[in-house]
Image (tube, grey):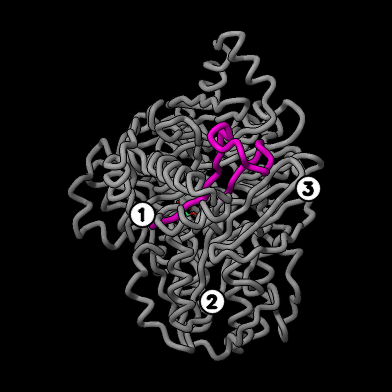
Amino acid sequence: MCGIVSYVGEEPKATRLLLQGLKSLEYRGYDSSGIALLNDTLSVYKNKGKILDLEKSLSTLSDEEREKLDQSICGIGHTRWATHGEPSDINAHPHMDSDGTIAVVHNGIIRNYIKLKKELIYKGYTFKSDTDTEVIANLFSYIRKDLIAKGEYEDFLAMRLLSSRLEGSYALAILLNESVNPNTTQPAKRILLAKHESPLVIGVGQSENFAASDSDTVLQFTDSIIRLADREFAVISKNTIDIQDFEGNMIKPVIEVLKKNDSLMDKKGYKHFLLKEINEQPTVLSKMLSLIEDSTYENFKLINFNINFAEIEKIYCIACGSAYHSAQALKYILGSWCSLPVDVIVASEFNFQHKLIGERDLLIGVSQSGETADTILALQKAKSAGARLLAITNRPASAINNLCGANTYITPADLEISVASTKAYTSQLMAHYLLALQIATARKAISREFFTDILHNLKTLPVLLDQMLNRANHYKAAAVNFAGYRDFIFLSRGINHTTAMEGALKLKELSYAHASAYPSGELKHGPIAILDENVPVISIAIPSIYPDEQIIYEKIIHNALEAKTRKSPSILLTTDSNQDHVEEFDLVMRIPDIDQLFSPILATIPLQFLAYFIAENLGKDVDQPRNLAKSVTVE
Ligand code: AGP
């Protein structure tokens, strides 16, 4: 989703740093990009397409224009993910006011932009784009001119007036051409920032300062950051950082010193970030197991949550996309280990359900980015309804961590660059097992023997996963057979319905083929109608030593064979030593022997590879699939 980067300093490196910053924001997903530079006047350069396209068009500028680029010490940049107005050169950010004295980049949505636009057109302002953002540029221009005319102009006052008119979410970076305000005593080269429900952090340097949507972007340039809170403004120049809240109170900046991140965009020799991230999964899982705070039966603690799990009557899990799929596993695990009811709800559908939450209920929010607008909103609603909150996120510097504080478990998967989730998803699955173990032991719901068995099984996962990475070529050979199909069905039951949903999502995201997942019992209730030789069916069937789960396995096999009788190419995903019915399938993909209860992490890997190799075979943009954003910061 949209990304912002800003630089103000004394060395002529604004253009280079803005482009570098934008490249590190590419992973968020975007369709156009642009920069604005403040020299004697404001100059905007923007393009539909990739940052590479922007760079190409910058290289064709006249010598005079190039000189401006090379001399700039102050600028803002943006990657746009279209919400209002199609991806185009004109709709790309930065946007300027009609007079060309203000440039704005924006992440978020202004809900009342149509009303404001009409008002501004009436006042004589003109608009070039279809975006909500251009309204901000013209509205700020109007407010500024009015304050200058009254001799009352001040940055924070102008921003307060601006935000009092804006409804919606916004992170903003604004550049001002000071030629219209000759009496100002403020540094001419400064950037105005605002944060309201969209991410924005400041980077503190020596005689230079930065701002970006992402702390990792800033950490390429400096190790010191300031996290702006919601409803805060800032004005940064090369030597000053002033912060004020929306009510007009000055805020003392809190500077955090973090580890600098030089290698953010390093693929470490892999062709794609996605492949690198698939290969990082064993390390992430090992790290999670080694970081368990207390692994004894008596006192098992993933981390020390400030929640009495013995008292909880019901759990609600809210999340989106892959995080939502992972949460389905928690439902099965807790249902099986301690008969604790878990409702898993898509965050954007949670709106009315928070009214059902009682005092003894726990709401768990799961989000890789920690910035997903739907998930944040659901957590906020649950909080105001009095529910206890717990979060699982991959990003320490995130809104969700801020909201849930000490009750946040940070998955140590590190930054996930590829838009399609792989290592963050499997780390969420592992987090669910470990959290379930903490809840089950706190409720004394499982025996010491079963506890030991669970931990043993979880500890084998990183080792088995590591071995599976050597099978990449085997999965590639399978994938090549299926690259030509446009529709796929994924079937499973029980805990691996999670895996079927995630497998289908990966395939959709990466290859743009249509893929649907069903609990296999549902097949004959409708989806079977579409089956023929053009619709492969991938069935995930993992045997179990537990009788209830073994019955699930047998039923999946029977449903898979029903599909086969409708001529669908049939793929079975099962364990290495399982020989049951395998000869009846067109293709068998295997994972190391593991019980069904612990299989979702391993069973996901072949499906990640399948999606990756099909997409690669079709020549798709693996790391930045079309239309997708990494952190979905709008509702
Ligand atoms: C996963 O491959 C997706 N790109 C997407 O479904 C993602 O899981 C979803 O948008 C939720 O994001 P979050 O985990 O950052 O909240």
Is the residue under label 3 in contact with that under label 2 (CB below 8 Å)?
A: no
Residue linked to disc 3: 223
Q: Is residue 290 left or right of residue 338?
A: right
Q: What amino acid type should be assigned to the residue bearing mark 1?
A: Leu
Residue linked to disc 1: 491
Image coordinates for residue 601, horizontal then vertical, percent: 56, 57
Q: Is residue 450 visible?
A: yes
Q: What amino acid type should be assigned to the residue bearing mark 2?
A: Leu
Q: Is residue 518 left or right of residue 62?
A: left
432 within the magenta span: no
**Tag 2: Cα neighbours inside 10 Å, few (<14), some, or many (≥20)?**
many
458 over 122 or under it: above or below: below
Q: Quadrant of the C terminus?
A: bottom left
Residue at 79% from the left image edge and 54% from the top image edge: 257
**Lower position in the chain sequence, tag 3 or tag 1:** 3
Residue linked to disc 2: 389
Label 2: state its secondary structure.
Answer: strand
